[in-house]
Image (cartoon, rainbow, N blue to C red):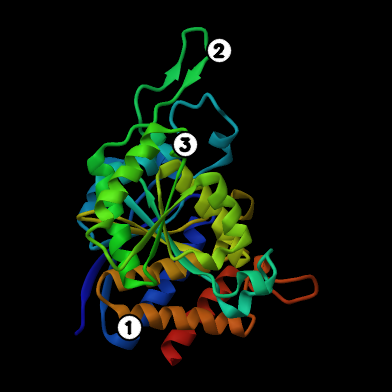
Amino acid sequence: MKRELNIALLPGDGIGPEIMNQAVKGLEAISQVYGHTFRYTKALIGACAIRSEGDPYPPATHEICVASDAILFGAIGHPDYDNNPSAKIRPEQGLLRMRRDLGLFANVRPLVLFESLADRSPLRPEVIRGTDFVCVRELTGGIYFGEPRGRDHDGTRAFDTCVYTRNEVDRILELAFKLAAKRRGLLTLVDKANVLETSRLWREAAQSMAVGYPGVTLEFMFVDNAAMQLIRQPAHFDVMVTENLFGDILTDEAGMLSGSLGMLPSASIGLKHALFEPIHGSYPSAAGKNIANPMAMILSASMMLEHLGLGEEGMHVRRAVETALEEGVVTEDLTRKGESSFSTSFVGDFVADCIKNK
């Protein structure tokens, strides 16, 4: 059945606009093949929004996101703010506010090794092969949002507060249990329950919920051990669930297993809205040079299609990406010395042509 969908495009900062253009190429190719209609509305977020509106997440952007069927987001961040610890308004504030205001409480990051990239990983091929897991990270609670936070009056002592409620923990665990039940049936809760009270709350909630999922094996792993096991035996994991700060760190570590952060998509999901984005940052030193890897952005569009009920179309995009990888049509981050690399726009054109020509 042909669909008409409204897609909010938030290119953001740095390489965001360049990689977003390649994802749109892929979506337009899908619309030609399947007869769907995608209507795009661009909006500002991050440093570009601060410069234009004085706000990293302007009200107009929020309205566009709320009115859309799904949101594609590029990247956020700029050196002017990264190198200025005293900046009162920061691009990242827009990202956090967007997650909170849209209720995007779950970040879902799949890590599936493409066979053609097994030798690009920093791990030996025999260690990395078979890696196929999903990390579910809580997005709107924890130390990033907890109060109080700040500094003492003389500025020599700083403090942040990590807070979780049982409702926040239950809703993310329910999503993770359901996902594990559809996969291999192994759910790993990553925490620091030997030290943190919030982690003990997570364990209590998980143990209570596990009774309702007899087909899922629940295991617990301290975050420091999890960081080690991601390197030692990444193929062990099926679904990993964890709180905001731990998930932020572990998913970037896991991202390097594939050979490049430029390969990994993600979804941020709430009860009403869903946003899709690559896990990497804005890579400002590459901005405007047409060298950034667009695959994570294109694969994020693939995840978006699947979320919207267009599973065949999403897989079609993924197969086009696989073809590009197998034929060596990649950007410089995935090449070795002496190998040819291609521009961001060329890779995007190639993937779009693969989609149209099946």
Point out which mark residue 312 bears: 1
Point out which mark residue 156 bears: 2
| Total marks placed | 3
Residue visible at 31% across and 43% down in the picture? 204
- Nearer the camera: disc 2 or disc 3: 3
Residue visible at 31% across and 50% down in the picture? 206
CA separation in Å, label 2 and label 1: 56 Å
First of labels 2, 3 by sequence position: 2
Residue 340: give x, y in percent of width and height.
Answer: 72, 76
Using the image as rendered, state which of residue 145 and residue 135 is in the foreground: 135
The vertical placement of 12 against 52, above or below, is: below
Toward which corner of the image does residue 327 lie, by quadrant?
bottom right
Residue 296: give x, y in percent of width and height.
Answer: 49, 65
Quick one: which residue is furthest to the top in this view?
Answer: 154
Q: Please, what is the three-letter code of the amino acid marked with disc 1?
A: Glu
User: Which residue position is annotated with label 3?
Assistant: 194
CA separation in Å, label 2 and label 3: 29 Å
Q: Please, what is the three-letter code of the amino acid marked with disc 2?
A: Thr
CA separation in Å, label 1 and label 3: 44 Å
First of labels 1, 3 by sequence position: 3
Give the side of residue 263 with respect to residue 356, left or right. right
Residue visible at 44% across and 70% down in the picture? 299
Quick one: which residue is furthest to the right in this view?
Answer: 338
Using the image as rendered, state which of residue 29 and residue 329 is in the foreground: 329
Provide the secondary structure element on which disc 2 rests: loop
- How crowded pointer 3 is (Cα within 10 Å; few <14, some 14-19, many 20+) is rated as few
Provide the secondary structure element on which disc 3 rests: loop
